[in-house]
Image (cartoon, grey):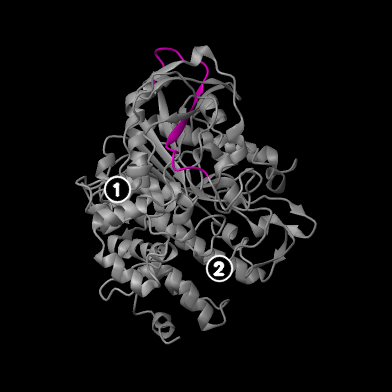
Amino acid sequence: MIKKSFVLISLLTLFSCTNDSQNKVIFIEDLDTLKETSSGQVIGFKHKNNSLAWFGIPYAEPPIDDLRWRAPKPKIRETEILKATSFADVCFQNRSFVDYSEEDGNYIGSEDCLYLNVHSPRNLTEESNLPVMLWIHGGGNTTGAGSAYDFSKLASEHEVIVVSLNYRLGPFGWFYHPSLNETSNLKEDKSGNFGLLDQILALKWLKNNIKEFGGNPKNITIFGESAGGHNVFSLISSQLAKGLFHRAISQSGSTRTTSIENASNYVDDEKIPGWPTSSKEIVNNLLVKNNQAKDIYEAKILQDSMNNLNLKNFLQNLSPSEIFDTYEEEMVAGMFNVPRIIADGYVLPKEGMEFKKGKFNKVPTMLGTNRDEMKLFYALDEEYVISFSTFLIYIRDEEKYEIENEYASNNWKINGVDQPARKLIKSGNSEVYAYRFDWDEEPKYLWMDFCKIFGAAHGFEIPFVTGNFDYFGFEKYIMNDKNKPAAIELSDSMMSYWAEFAYKGNPGKGRQKNLISWLPWQNGPEKAKFIVLDSSNDKGIFMSKSELFYNDELQRLAEDNRIKDLKTRCEYIENLKESGNQSNFFLKECKKL
């Protein structure tokens, strides 16, 4: 786990976690925005950028008490008009170190958090039938909120309906335990994928209600970044989401899953050891913390002997903070390692996200990563940077920084773009569009070169997609008078591509038909693969024919004379172990270390 340095410029938190103070802003309702929904009547307001907005609309019953660790239930219709003029609470999560909340303690938010927000252009009529885009926020599926993102400009300038949502996070969103499974007859309750089920219910809500807001329920695009992109791949893989969306965009996503054994077994299980944060290990710790057992050994005996209903009641009666206190792993920007995206065999296929023919939701799909994904995480790690007080000073070893970013970011691209693109096309989906975001024109301040520190880092494409560069005052560290015009130009192009994809399932030449033609990924050498998104001050926008393979990266590692010692080389190989190429000399040598 990467160490958390006290770095002021943590754009990971900036992009994935909400500024809780904005939840306290209440806008004045507008009677012309009164809408009829299955949740009840809601009234919104005139928002900026010539848009309309409705914040904090409930799409599910609060997942509390007996509904904790259960599939979400549709919201029962309210009899009173809901003033949808302020954000609802974020889902319960760790407080991150970039947080303006006035709340005390280590945590923010509430378990009562299943709400969504709607952005639309103002020129709606009864005949409006606009594409709908559902944003799924990032944050490692342990932090974040839909309220962190302002889509008013994307909605108004490109005439789309943009919806953001909250979904359960961390152990409330993903928790697979036998005692919970055995006390319900519903397969959804037995899946452990509660955060994903929240997203599926939100899609059902859109299908039934979005027409009221001027949206087309037969043209819904899901899009998300980081964990949100991971969830997009999950929805593509889930048969429970079939027919609920019609296009998909994964930004810096992943296709990795956790087995039910890893998610639930004890760490000393002889057949398949569980994670240190598996559900059974967490229950052990909870039993000890609540004085039900003297130590872990006694807790294990007690847990194995407990009646399922009694254990379920014990878990559901605990406070959120009692549960989160049990996860003692080191955190990065509020995120921690908890089993999630569980291959349970019902919500998600047992074999994971293999996109086998006829077993996934075949829709036009856009997927991409940023060239320097890992630099954001390295900038938070004291092993890589030297920081003084709250201001980042400089990189310890620039060559190491660049080499490690190169291999780790390439590995991210293989897992999140190249490999899934090849699988999707092989399984019959010819409508796959890939990108790489290359913008790296951050300014210098004093002796700090943010172009080298961050480059095209994780999450940096988000403001280009939203068109909103006002991010909590941090924009001054990545934007200045010199680079802003070209950045806005690139943002306009990206919004145009994203909106055109929502309209047609093909980004083409953008909404105005004036951009470089974005071609679909084609398997095979010397064929179009992905589009590079960069500003006109640099290399601009162009198509690339290159692609990455695990085995090629392993071979490159073996021959890379920049890496002097075997231990460092083995660390890189660990990140590429999915290739399974055991014939590689260095893999054999690494086993000896």
Residue farthest toward the right in the current orientation of the protein: 446
Of residues 541 and 102, the one nearer the viewer is 102
Is any atom of residue 453 visible in this view? yes
Q: Mark 1 points at which residue?
A: 237
Of residues 78 and 225, the one nearer the viewer is 78
Q: Does the magenta stretch include residue 374?
A: no
Is 328 situated above or below 18? Answer: below
Q: How busy is the neighbourhood of tag 2: few (under 14 within 10 Å), some, or many (20 plus)?
A: some
Q: How far apart are marks 2 and 1 (CA)?
A: 31 Å
Q: Which residue is drawn at 39% across and 19% down?
A: 79
Residue numbers of the magenta segment? 109-129
Mark number for residue 427?
Answer: none
In-image side of 320 versus 268 (left or right):
right
Of residues 218 and 296, the one nearer the viewer is 296
Q: Which residue is drawn at 60% across and 66% down?
A: 402
Q: What residue type is labelled 2?
A: Glu
The quarter holding residue 431 reads top left
Mark number for residue 404?
Answer: 2
Count of numbered tags? 2
Q: What element carries label 1?
A: helix
N-terminal of the two: label 2 or label 1? Answer: 1
Is 46 situated above or below 200? Answer: above
Q: What residue type is labelled 1?
A: Ser
Q: Where is residue 95 in the image (x, y as percent from the top left)?
A: 57, 51
The quarter holding residue 18 reads top right
